Amino acid sequence: MMLTIRLQRVGKTKKPTYRFIISEKTHDTQGHYLELLGNYNPTEKENKITVKADRVTYWISKGAQMSNTVNNLLVKNGIIKGKTMKSVFLSETRKKKIAEEKKAAAPAPAATPAA
């Protein structure tokens, strides 16, 4: 049984709020979860995150993994220590397109004058 700490989207249309939940990795985020660890409101300017820090550290000590987004939010707000992780990945086609754009934008090397 692999446990993960991840976000569950709740709220109204175009006004999202998220819950920090712990559940099995294979289970749906909208389904059953073991424990509610806190919530996150990205639309508020102050005090966006309320988390039970002691429960988060407890579950991490028991071997629970965090999603990259949860890890980044907790590190950013000083709840846990560590590095932020990359949470957005580019597809292969997008990477190729960006590489082609860089090649096209790079100036051609200037020819050296013959002496």
Image (cartoon, grey):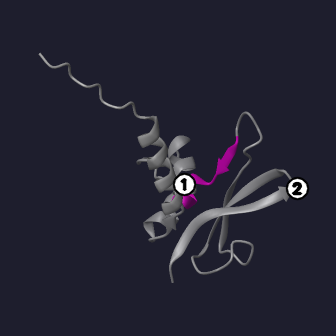
For this rendering, which residue is in front, 15 or 55? 15
The image quadrant of residue 77 is top right
Residue type pointed to by label 2: Lys
Quarter placement of the C terminus: top left
Above or below, 30 against 76 in this view is below
For residue 24, the mark is: none
Question: Percent x, y for residue 80?
Answer: 48, 49
For residue 12, the mark is: 2
Q: Residue at x 73, y 56 (%)?
A: 18
For residue 88, the mark is: 1
Question: Percent x, y for residue 71?
Answer: 52, 54
Residue range in magenta is 48-56
Question: Percent x, y for residue 52?
Answer: 62, 54
Q: Residue at x 53, y 49 (%)?
A: 72
* Total marks placed: 2
Horizontal side, residue 17 vs residue 51: left or right: right
Residue type pointed to by label 1: Val
Sequence-wise, the earlier of marks 2 and 1 is 2
Element type where label 2 sits in the image? strand
